[in-house]
Amino acid sequence: MQDWDIVSGIGITALAVAAARAVESSRDEPLVSDPYAVAFVEAADSPIPLPRRAGDLPRDDDLWERMSLFVGLRSRFFDEYLLEAMTAGVRQVVVLAAGLDARAFRLDLPPETTLYEVDQPRVLEFKDSVLDAQPRCERRTVAVDLRNDWAGALGDAGFDPEQPTAWLVEGLLPYLSRDASAQLLDTLHTLSAPGSTVAIEYVHDPKAALEDPAVRNLLREFGFDYAALLPEDPHGDPGEQLSAAGWTVSAVSGADLAERYGRTPLDDGASMFGANDRYLTGRFG
């Protein structure tokens, strides 16, 4: 997780996710509604053209179709998780590696909720320069590299470890080594009061996506070595670690989500957009 801007390195992958979310949001019956995603794409000086709506996609562009479905399913899963946590009474939210997430603005969150966005200073600066809206709840940005003392920075921003927290860990674990992932989850657990919940996206084999020629071609257009961002010793199963620490966890696959939300199930090929992805929810105490 090197320092990055929005149009280079891992930054442009966050921008591509925003483009996919904008595409999905433009459909007649979208999985996710994110009116801010297209604003991020338009504001960034991307080195390659990025789609902004479904009508922008060439008829033979299967990759962006799959990517918009993948991002739509993932976003819908995390949206529903967060709203369920709010219904259960949780009023403190932490989004780790928040990227271009705009849930504080687009979801109907209780106004007394405090939502912390933790990410690199440059991505948070870009996000704030683009957003021209008031958040639905109290939003606090925590500008820190997750390799550093992010727990301390979170505390300095007002985080209360005595209150239940809803944690979102979306699009992060695939870039972490086994040790880094274990340390992050250990810190998350240490900061979690009883009644806290967590939602995590994880991937059994992050490098499997590179076996897809269409993915390789797109990453080549982005102009950086995506494989270099992925660890040689990828993260393990977060459910095992959290279960051992006293969390009650369950997990579903991307194909499960496709069936749940009435979309054509993703294929079982080795792809970051297919059944290689897993989505975990957990509750502590």
Image (cartoon, rainbow, N blue to C red):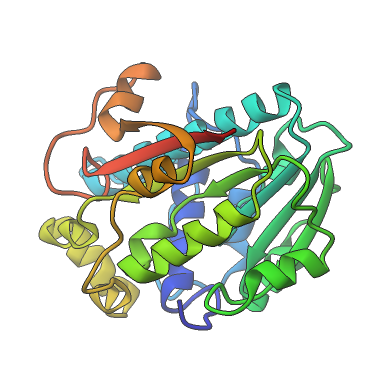
**Residue 104: x %, y % from top left:** 73, 45
Q: Is residue 153 left or right of residue 70?
A: right
**Residue at 88% across / 37% down in the picture?**
112
Locate residue 50: give its quadrant: bottom left
* Rendered position, 24 above or below 42: above
Foreground: 232 or 267? 232
* Rendered position, 219 above or below 214: below
**Residue at 31% across / 80% down in the picture?**
224
**Residue 236: x %, y % from top left:** 28, 56
* Rendered position, 247 above or below 262: below
Foreground: 34 or 245? 245
**Residue at 24% across / 59% down in the picture?**
206
Q: Is residue 147 left or right of residue 264?
A: right
* Rendered position, 106 above or below 117: above
Q: Is residue 201 left or right of residue 210?
A: right
Say whether residue 273 is visible: yes
Quarter in which the C terminus is drawn: top right
Q: Is residue 82 left or right of residue 224?
A: right
Q: Kindly give the residue lying farthest to the bottom in the view shown.
A: 3
Foreground: 179 or 26? 179
**Residue 139: x %, y % from top left:** 81, 52
**Residue at 74% across / 33% down in the picture?**
90
Quarter in which the N terminus is drawn: bottom left
Say whether residue 132 is visible: no
Foreground: 39 or 127? 127
